[in-house]
Amino acid sequence: MKKMMTSQEIAGFELSVHPNAAPGFQEWVFCPGMLFQSTGKWWGKRGERNRPHEGLDLLLYRNDEGSIRHIDASFLVPMLADGRIVGMMDDFLGQSIIVEHPSLKGNPENILTMYGHTHPLKHVQPGITMRKGNYSA
């Protein structure tokens, strides 16, 4: 099995975590196949994906004791930027939330992000505006 990578080994990646969401959080940990454009599966019987991965799987983290832990359904997912929820749909592990963000860093186009496999909080519905750092799921 290939070695796991830490968030420090992935150039340019930074995602903060609220201290209550993941006790003792120090850094994200990634298995091969969890990263954008990966072609391998990190779950089940492993093997190859049908197409390259279109996201980033945030599941494992190292705590301040050095143990690797996993997030669960109680993990709160913060918005990465201000935005409006434009859609929600069932997926095979929960629901996906689609958020439209106004242009970032001078880019004239809006950006869409998708938070997949979540269990949204009751107030999270299409049409509402969320602020960066507010919890969606």
Image (spheres, rainbow, N blue to C red):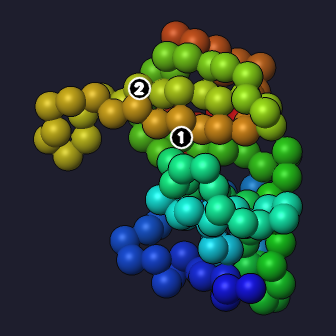
Camera-nearest label, 1 or 2:
2
| Image-quadrant location for residue 104 | top left
| Image-quadrant location for residue 96 | top right
Q: Identify the residue shown where x is 16% and y is 39%.
A: 107
Q: Identify the residue shown where x is 61% and y is 50%.
A: 50
Q: How many marks?
A: 2
| Residue 109 appears in the picture as rendered | yes
Look at the image and tell me in which quarter the C terminus lies.
top right
Q: Position of residue 27 (x, y in %)?
A: 63, 76
Q: Position of residue 98 (x, y in %)?
A: 53, 27
Three-letter code, disc 2: Glu
Q: Nearer the viewer, residue 37 or 106?
A: 37
Q: Identify the residue shown where x is 57% and y is 13%.
A: 126
Three-letter code, disc 1: Met
Secondary structure of the residue carrying numbered label 1:
loop
Q: Earlier in the sequence, mark 1 or mark 2?
A: 1
Residue at label 1?
79
Relative height, residue 57 to residue 122 (above, below): below
Q: Nearer the viewer, residue 72 or 48?
A: 48
Crowding at mark 2 (Cα within 10 Å: few <14, some 14-19, many 20+): some
> Distance from label 1 to label 2 (Cα)?
11 Å
Relative height, residue 128 to residue 35 (above, below): above
Relative height, residue 114 to residue 2 (above, below): above
Residue at label 2?
100
Toward the top, the furthest residue is 127
Q: Identify the residue shown where x is 54% and y is 76%.
A: 7
Q: Nearer the viewer, residue 69 or 5?
A: 5
Q: Position of residue 2 (x, y in %)?
A: 67, 86
Relative height, residue 5 to residue 12 (above, below): below
| Image-quadrant location for residue 109 | top left
